[in-house]
Amino acid sequence: MTVTSRAVTTAVLATLLAVASFVGPLWTAVAAALLVVLLAVGWAPLLRLPAEGATTLVVLVAGLGGLAVTWFTQGEPVLRNLPLVIAMSLVLAFVAQMLRRGGRPRLVESVSGMTAGVVAAVCAAGWVAAVRTDAGADLVTTSAVALAVGSAVSALPIAAGWTGSLLAAALGAAAGVGAASALPEVEPLLGLVVGLVAGLVAAALRFLFDRQPTLARRRAALAAVAVPVTVTGMLVLVVGRLLV
């Protein structure tokens, strides 16, 4: 999958999330679950980890578990049970390593890769929590629009290097302000900050994955396009809590 196609796919996923947030919180959770599945399926191939099946299972359980506990948690803080999901997922990761056979080659790499996947997948719960804030669907939509713009810009030929990354962040911030101006529950300052965060995530992850040879594999590319959206969810929730 080329840089352009990955950027377009990330933008489509962000747009899908924005639409789902307006349909209802349940559909936001469904869209977030789709992101978790894409991430889990491609995480091991993306990082060239051993024990692909075990890695997929651990990341999938962590991501879907995080969404489930966030959905069923009533009152504030809505993410109070999320640390338990992360802890149990890490225990599951160690159990998966103990069940490996053949000498457990690249053990440290496998454990660290699983742990990173768990964190990235659990971040998707941020979208479910964000849609339940006072700003609700407007906050999710503003963030998703900014992420889509930042992802699209990061794929342009002029976006290579640090200059392009700064351009993606700046246009993401501008898109956030524009979206906030059209939505009643989001102030322009909040739109600016979440847009800047989303643009920086899109640019940084493009920078991180750009030279990965594994992106030629379809499953690895699926994880690469899903990661910016899942990670942004938790960051947007934090910004929303601070500024709403």
Image (cartoon, rainbow, N blue to C red):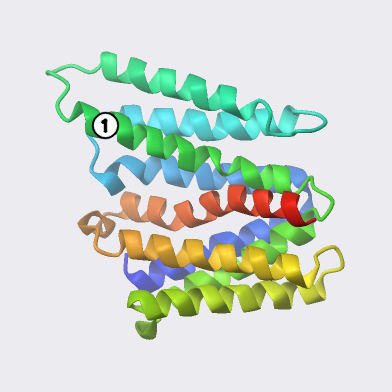
Q: Secondary structure at mark 1?
A: helix
Residue found at x 36% / y 45%: 42
Q: Is residue 135 above or below residue 157?
A: above
Q: Is residue 45 above or below residue 56?
A: below
Q: Quadrant of residue 78?
A: top right
Quadrant occupied by the N terminus? bottom left
Residue found at x 17% / y 21%: 104
Residue found at x 79% / y 49%: 24
Residue found at the far bottom of this picture: 158
Could you say which is closer to the camera, residue 143 or residue 55?
143
- The local crowd at label 1, few if under 14, some if 14 to 19, many if 20 or more residues have their Cα within 10 Å, is many
What residue would you read off at disc 1? 110
Could you say which is closer to the camera, residue 135 or residue 49?
135
Answer whether residue 155 is visible to the viewer in this image.
no
Q: Amino acid at mark 1?
A: Ser
Quadrant occupied by the C terminus? bottom right
Could you say which is closer to the camera, residue 242 or residue 101?
242
Spot occupied by residue 45 in the image (x, y as percentages of width and height): 28, 44
Could you tell whether 140 is left or right of 39 in the image?
right
Residue found at the far front of this picture: 242
Could you tell whether 209 is left or right of 88 in the image?
left
Q: Quadrant of residue 66?
A: top right
Could you tell whether 62 is left or right of 102 in the image?
right
Q: Is residue 14 above or below residue 72?
A: below
Spot occupied by residue 106 in the image (x, y as percentages of width and height): 17, 30
Spot occupied by residue 227 in the image (x, y as percentages of width and height): 46, 52
Q: Is residue 202 above or below residue 92?
A: below
Spot occupied by residue 96 in the image (x, y as percentages of width and height): 33, 19
The mark tally for this picture is 1
Answer whether residue 243 is visible to the viewer in this image.
yes
Could you tell whether 75 is left or right of 236 in the image?
right
